[in-house]
């Protein structure tokens, strides 16, 4: 019998609806292949310095982001437990795309899964998307779920 190509799947989540879809697919692929899932939530500090002074980024605001992350990670852990999948929770601070890419490379991840809001055209160009940055710069296969 052939060994599975996927041993470790990284599912990046921000708790959004599109991330929940990616989580579901990630759990299903892990179940089918016997892979373990690393669920990653990044507290984005990309704009923290300017937002702290301009828009009132506070420690309380960052704490609320951390709580949101804990809920998102607990959701994935629950799905993993139901499916009999090992789920490794990972909580990081920094620039989301960079943290996802660095974690994947440093931890021998075989597949990165993440959701996207499906922004297109000028809007996507102006805003930039974490999924797009990861897709463009990853040396590891990436699956984007709408």
Image (cartoon, rainbow, N blue to C red):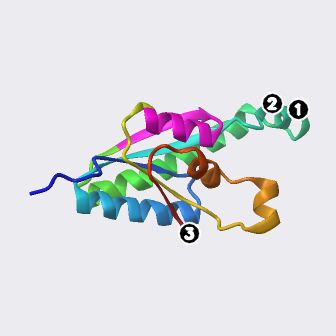
Q: Looking at the rendered structure, which numbered label has been put on residue 146?
A: 3
Give the crowd class for mark 2: few <14, some 14-19, many >=20 residues within 10 Å: few
Identity of the residue drawn at 75% across and 61% down: 124
Say what secondary structure mark 1 lies in. helix
Q: Earlier in the sequence, mark 3 or mark 2?
A: 2
Give the crowd class for mark 1: few <14, some 14-19, many >=20 residues within 10 Å: few
How many dots with numbers?
3
Report whether residue 74 is seen.
yes
Above/below status of 46 relative to 117 = above
Report whether residue 66 is seen.
no
Say what secondary structure mark 3 lies in. loop
Say what secondary structure mark 2 lies in. helix
Q: Looking at the rendered structure, which numbered label has been put on residue 49?
A: 2
Coordinates of residue 51 in the picture (x, y in percent)? 83, 37
Coordinates of residue 29 in the picture (x, y in percent)? 32, 61
Identity of the residue drawn at 64% across and 43% down: 65
Q: Is residue 38 magenta?
A: no
Give whichever of 137, 51 is nearer the camera. Answer: 137
Name the image quarter holding the C terminus.
Answer: bottom right
Q: Is residue 91 magenta?
A: yes
Q: Are marks 1 and 2 in contact (CB under 8 Å)?
A: yes
Identity of the residue drawn at 44% across and 59% down: 23
Boundaries of the magenta span: 88-105
Is 124 displayed left or right of 36 in the figure? right
Q: Looking at the rendered structure, which numbered label has been put on residue 53?
A: 1
**Separation (CA) of disc 3 from disc 2:** 31 Å
């Amino acid at each position: 019998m052939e060994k599975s190509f996927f041993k470790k799947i990284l599912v990046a989540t921000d708790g959004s609806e599109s991330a929940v879809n990616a989580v579901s697919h990630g759990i299903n692929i892990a179940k089918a292949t016997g892979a373990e899932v690393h669920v990653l939530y990044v507290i984005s500090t990309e704009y923290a310095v300017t937002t702290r002074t301009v828009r009132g980024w506070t420690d309380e605001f960052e704490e609320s982001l951390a709580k949101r992350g804990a809920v998102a990670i607990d959701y994935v852990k629950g799905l993993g437990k139901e499916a009999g999948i090992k789920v490794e929770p990972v909580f990081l601070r920094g620039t989301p795309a960079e943290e996802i890419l660095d974690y994947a490379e440093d931890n021998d991840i075989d597949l990165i899964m993440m959701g996207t809001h499906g922004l297109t055209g000028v809007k996507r160009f102006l805003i930039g998307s974490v999924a797009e940055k990861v897709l463009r710069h990853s040396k590891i296969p990436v699956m984007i779920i709408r």
